Amino acid sequence: MRKPFIAGNWKLHKTVTEALDLAGALKQEAAGVEDIDIVIAPVYTALAKTADLLTNSNIQVAAQNCYPAVSGAFTGEVSPALLKDAGCRYCIVGHSERRQLEGLKDISTQAMQNLVVAYEPVWAIGTGKTASDEQAEEAHCFIRGLLRGLYDEAVAEATRILYGGSVKPDNVDGLMAQKDIDGTLVGGASLKAADFARIIKFKRP
Ligand code: PEP
């Protein structure tokens, strides 16, 4: 059984004060929600304070990007070690919006332990259009097959594969009912406490 994983990608939204307000509201909403990994990804400037606020809660903090070096002359970049130091437990790597800004790059060099994969059809990101439950399941099944071929059965069965692309309170239950969909990566709907709360409280089949 793979533990569900629900992540909110706040993208370029929220001042530090606004981030703390939202994180505080989510902390209350998520109290008592068990057997699921809940992660939020604020902007860099809000990471450390948000992580502090969420200490001893069931919400973990992620960064939205990182640079695969320990330290050095890399102006403007942040390393995984510094993100960990700021209280991050996860980091999004290779988001399509970053690849659009930077051009295609090999994201394998950024991959860290505890890999969670997200399938996000680009036409569904921020558009309000969502893949049907069946389309998403077909893609997830395909990705799990790739993992089986690249690694082995154990890795394929253990890796959580998230769906992303206009996930909302009214479509999360159907997506999460699919066998190979282990969670969701949520953009727009993660910016409202009530919507994200409903998403983490998806109805289990
Ligand atoms: C995302 O940020 O990865 C995303 C899927 O955004 P949205 O939910 O707004 O489509």
Image: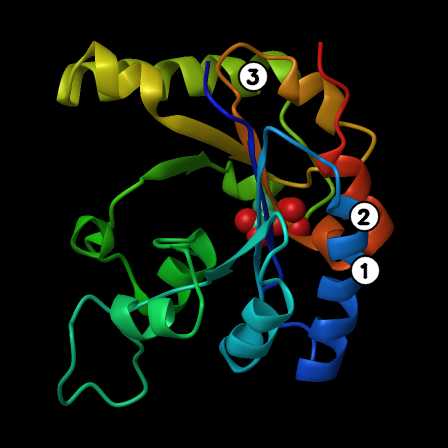
Q: Is residue 45 above or below residue 172?
A: below
Name the residue: 44% across, 28% down: 161
Classed neighbour count for the residue bearing mark 3: other residues with Cα under 10 Å, few (<14), some (14–19), many (≥20): few
Q: Is residue 69 left or right of residue 183?
A: left
Q: Sequence-wise, which precedes: disc 3 or disc 1?
A: 1
Single out the mark in the foreground, 2 or 3: 2
Of 75 and 159, nearer the camera is 159
Q: Is residue 102 above or below residue 192?
A: below
The residue where tag 2 is placed is 29
Distance from disc 3 to disc 1, alpha carbons, whole Å, reads 33 Å
Which amino acid type is marked by label 3? Answer: Gln
Residue 121, numbered circle: none
Of 139 and 41, nearer the camera is 41
Q: Sequence-wise, which precedes: disc 2 or disc 3?
A: 2
Q: Is residue 135 visible?
A: yes
The residue where tag 3 is placed is 135
Element carrying mark 3: helix
Q: Are marks 3 and 1 in contact (CB under 8 Å)?
A: no
Pointer 3 residue Cβ closer than 8 Å to ligand 1: no
Element carrying mark 1: helix
Distance from disc 2 to disc 3, alpha carbons, whole Å, reads 31 Å
Name the residue: 49% across, 76% down: 44
The residue where tag 1 is placed is 25
The C terminus sits in image quarter: top right
